[in-house]
Amino acid sequence: MGFGPFVKTNPGGGKAGTKVGILGTNLKGATAVSFNGTEATFSAVSKATIIATVPAGATTGFVTVTTPSGTLTSNAAFQILP
């Protein structure tokens, strides 16, 4: 039995400039990643992993990944650290 679509950040918090792993399902072809609405740079490592950089100006909130199948939202808020 497979998992439904999801995304989870690892770690769950960090400062601007921190590289964050985003684990999930169906991430192939991702076109955008944002931290509480602030666009981030990212690269796909595999169909289940993306590495994103926490953007300057991001605030604590959910991470979203836009894929050809739709937008996935993290299961917990990402904490922006000072």
Image (cartoon, rainbow, N blue to C red):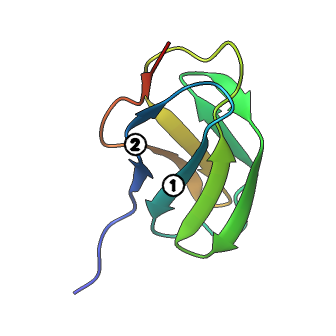
**Residue at the extreme left:** 1
Residue visible at 32% across and 67% down? 4
Question: Residue 65 bears which disc, if any?
Answer: none
Picture mark count: 2
**Toward the viewer: 23 or 69?**
23
Q: Is residue 44 above or below residue 22?
A: below
Residue under label 1: 22
- The residue lying at 38 percent from left, 57 percent from top is 6
14 relative to 71, above or below = above
Q: Residue furthest front?
A: 82
> Residue at horizontal 58%, vertical 51%?
70
Quadrant of the image occupied by residue 76: top left
Q: Is residue 82 above or below residue 70?
A: above
Question: For the residues marked 1 and 2, what is the alpha-carbon distance in whole angstroms?
Answer: 9 Å
Which amino acid, by three-letter code, is at mark 1?
Answer: Ile
49 relative to 11, above or below = below
Residue 8 location, x and y as percent?
39, 51
Nearest to the eye among marks 1 and 2: give it: 1
How far across and how far down the image is residue 75, in percent? 31, 43
Q: Is residue 29 left or right of residue 11?
A: right
Residue 21 horizontal/vertical position (percent): 53, 55
Type of the residue with mark 2: Ser
Picture quarter containing residue 54? Answer: top right
What residue sits 78% from the left and 42% below the top? 41
Q: 14 or 71, which is in the foreground? A: 14
Q: Quadrant of residue 17?
A: top right
Within 10 Å of disc 2 (Cα), the crowding (few <14, some 14-19, many 20+) is: some
Q: Badges 1 and 2: C-beta atoms under 8 Å apart?
A: yes
The residue wearing badge 2 is 74
